[in-house]
């Protein structure tokens, strides 16, 4: 079945109307492991980031705890455990985040990959004359 994206989006708030499988493009919205775990898979985010209606009490608990901690080294084991659970549950199909640098003139230097948005961190670009 083929539907325009605007029609698909209206179905994301109802598991009975939604499709069994969608292939939307999804990239990081913010530079934090919570983007890929809590935002996309926490059950409180039904109708928002969690378009699959995935629910796992352990994932919810771990991501809630991790959000309260600012020390990255203390948060890391929680997000690693959540990642293992998500893979074991096959909560999503993770393909890749392509390194795309786009077409640039030969005079453009220092283009860096960034996992957020369209994968380009333009702050570092230098134009040589």
Image (cartoon, grey):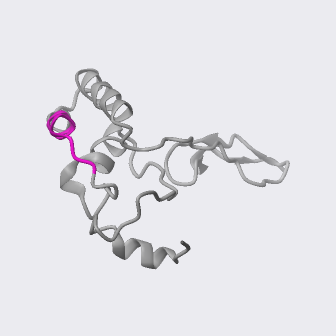
5 lies above or below 54 = below
**Left or right of 58, for residue 22:** right
Instruction: Give the x, y percent position of residue 18.
Output: 36, 67
Instruction: Give the x, y percent position of residue 129.
Output: 84, 50
Q: Residue at x 29, y 46 (%)?
A: 41
Q: Is residue 62 magenta?
A: yes
Q: Residue at x 27, y 64 (%)?
A: 47
Q: Is residue 102 magenta?
A: no
78 lies above or below 118 = above
Residue 14 image-quadrant placement: bottom left
71 lies above or below 35 = above
Instruction: Give the x, y percent position of residue 11.
Output: 35, 72
**Which residues are drawn in magenta?**
54-64
Residue 10 image-quadrant placement: bottom left
Nearest the eye: 93 or 31: 93
Dominant secondary structure, magenta: helix
Instruction: Give the x, y percent position of residue 86.
Output: 34, 35
51 lies above or below 4 = above
Residue 63 image-quadrant placement: top left
Quadrant of the drawing holding the N terminus: bottom right
Q: Residue at x 60, y 50 (%)?
A: 122
Q: Residue at x 41, y 52 (%)?
A: 29
Nearest the eye: 21 or 94: 21
**Left or right of 92, for residue 111:** right
């Amino acid at each position: 079945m083929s539907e325009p994206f605007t029609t698909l989006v209206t179905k994301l708030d109802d598991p009975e109307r939604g499709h069994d499988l969608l292939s939307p493009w999804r990239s990081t919205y913010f530079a934090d492991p919570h983007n890929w775990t809590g935002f996309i898979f926490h059950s409180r985010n039904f109708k928002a980031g969690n378009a699959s209606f995935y629910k796992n009490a352990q994932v919810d608990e771990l991501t809630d705890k991790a959000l309260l901690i600012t020390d990255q080294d203390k948060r890391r084991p929680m997000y690693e455990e959540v990642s293992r659970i998500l893979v074991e549950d096959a909560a999503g199909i993770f393909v890749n985040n392509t390194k795309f640098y786009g077409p640039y003139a030969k005079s453009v230097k220092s283009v860096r990959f960034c996992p957020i948005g369209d994968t380009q961190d333009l702050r570092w670009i230098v134009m040589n004359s």
